[in-house]
Amino acid sequence: MSPRITAVAALAVPVLAGIAYLWFYGAPASYPVINAVALAIGMAAILLPPLAIGSRARRTIIVVLLLLLFVPLATGPHLNGIARWLPLGPFQLHAGTLVLPSLAVLAARETDYAPPILLAALLAAFAQPDAATGFAVMFTAVGLYNATRDWRLVPVAGVAFLATLIAGFRGELPAQPFVERLLMRLALEAPLIALALLAALLAGFFMTAHSLSAPKAERHALAGALFGFSLAALLSNYPSVLIGYGAAPIIGFGAALALARQTPSG
């Protein structure tokens, strides 16, 4: 399987399974359409010719992504004191799922600066508060440690765990149908559908972790982010990334998979 096809499959398998679920299980008609458009955007990014990204450009992108994580705190919308969404006209995109996947890939290329990059992302997640993004930061650090054995990532993961617990108590919102707690609800209502969606999500996870044409650190960092977001969706009312309704995680992971295919030039 070619590198491009592998990256496309890592995104498309769980997203297409989620679209089928939304279409046949009674979700609003716009939900599968929006997810399909987001998938097309993500696949287009992956299929673009690889570009050489120098260290200066990479660090500029990292700064921009970190700033984007903090934007909701200034712009809102705010809901019960919680601000996690980037307002884009009629759409509100979850900042963490849109930004953190690419940040994980780029942090993996910054051997010296990965821990402070992840801690800066964690600060935004704690302030919003957003336990899902906190979990994603934690497991990104775990994935990076597994690939690099950099001891500095161990305290980052520990701090992220504590910050995520606190954010979880402060940031609880009601679950939205077809968006949050998807697998938990389906396990009771339609266990076979739940198993099919879980299998598709796991397929995307393992392709990301083991089959991408990218360095091990980048693959494991991105897979860690996916695991963290998915775990948060199982434990509390957070988006079921890729398999549930939501354009932000689909575009976010599509952009990250595209970045993982880019060639560092310095």
Image (cartoon, rainbow, N blue to C red):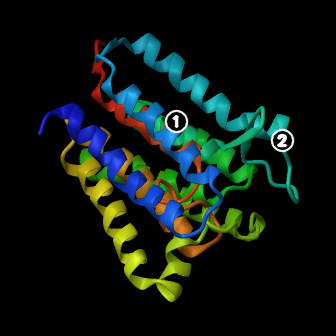
* Left or right of residue 50: residue 45: right
Q: Is residue 103 visible?
A: yes
Vertical comparison of 213 with 205: above or below: above
Q: Which residue corresponds to the image point at 66% horizontal and 31% vertical from the top-left? A: 68
Q: Quadrant of the C terminus?
A: top left
Return the x and y of residue 156 as percentages of the image width and height: 49, 51
Q: Is residue 111 visible?
A: no
Q: Which residue is mark 1?
A: 117
Q: Which residue corresponds to the image point at 51% horizontal and 58% vertical from the top-left? A: 229
Amino acid type of disc 2?
Gly
Return the x and y of residue 79 as percentages of the image width and height: 85, 55
Q: What is the number of the mark on residue 76?
A: 2
- In primary-sequence order, the first of circles 1 and 2 is 2
Residues under numbered marks 1 and 2 in contact, where contact means CB atoms less than 8 Å apart? no
Toward the viewer: 25 or 240?
25
Return the x and y of residue 114 as percentages of the image width and height: 44, 36
Q: Which residue corresponds to the image point at 58% horizontal and 55% vertical from the top-left? A: 245
As helix, strand or loop, the secondary structure at mark 2 comes to: loop
Number of numbered tags placed on the structure image: 2
* Left or right of residue 20: residue 65: right
Q: Residues within 10 Å of mark 2 (few under 14, many from 20)?
A: some
